[in-house]
Image (cartoon, rainbow, N blue to C red):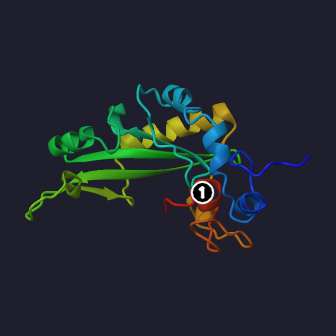
Amino acid sequence: MQAKANKTYATSKRVKSEITGITKHMMLGYILFNYVDKNKWVSELKSCFGVQFVDNLTDFNYSRGFLYCINEGGIEIVLNTGQLYEYLCEHKTLDRLFIYISTLAPFVTYEYMQYQYVESEEPVVHKNQQIHLRRDHLPGDDFKKFVESGIEKFCENNGLLIVKESDLRTRIEGISLEVSGEKATVFDFFFDDETK
């Protein structure tokens, strides 16, 4: 069959480019963005953690998985909204659980982060200048117990396995990803090539 050259047909160059992107750089954005429901795990997470609100940050741009957040105390605050700023002005900090779920393997990982409101002596151009994120934050015992119980239940109910922090940092030989290139780690490969 002889195809007409028009905008509804892929060029040979485009086909080769997609093959290279998928096989060499693991670029799966098109597949994930168009065929995977970003909300797949929301109701299950609500059930396992016993909360009414889960913030869905899944975007599939450079990620190979889902990203969901649960706020300490189950507080309903969406990231990058005025809600976060208003909450932090009053309470000064917000602990959040970030849950990563791979689409490539039955793997999960999670991390704690804390948003902090910081007073500024300098004039503030944008209110987000007063919000700082701590990635190395360890939460209080109550939130930690809540998280461990919820993660365990979520993994057991869904046949998922938690990948340890030490394994997440391991470099993968012979794999090149779009953002991390030849320095790809287990985290980059299974969860997100842009985040860490």
Residue at the right extreme of this rendering: 1
Nearer to me, 123 or 42: 123
Residue 116 screen position, x and y as percent: 25, 53
Please say whether residue 66 is visible from this viewpoint: yes
Relative side of 136 to 36, left or right: left
Please say whether residue 161 is visible from this viewpoint: no
Relative side of 159 to 122, left or right: right
- Mark 1: secondary structure: loop
Residue 13 screen position, x and y as percent: 75, 63
Which residue does the image show at 49% across and 59% down from the upper left?
Answer: 195
Relative side of 26 to 119, left or right: right
Which residue does the image show at 57% across and 48% down from the upper left?
Answer: 60
Q: Is residue 35 above or below residue 15?
A: above
Count neighbours of disc 1 (C-alpha within 10 A) and say few if under 14, some if 14 to 19, many if 20 or more. Answer: few
According to the image, label 1 marks what residue?
164
Which residue does the image show at 15% across and 41% down from the upper left?
Answer: 90
Which residue does the image show at 76% across and 52% down from the upper left?
Answer: 5
Nearer to me, 17 or 103: 17
Nearer to me, 188 or 8: 8
Q: Is residue 193 above or below residue 145?
A: below
Nearer to me, 193 or 196: 193
Relative side of 139 to 43, left or right: left
Q: Is residue 98 above or below residue 39?
A: below
On the image, which quarter does residue 21 sit in? bottom right
Circle count:
1
Residue 140 screen position, x and y as percent: 34, 47
- Amino acid type shown at disc 1: Lys
On the image, which quarter does residue 142 sit in? top left
Q: Is residue 77 above or below residue 96?
A: above
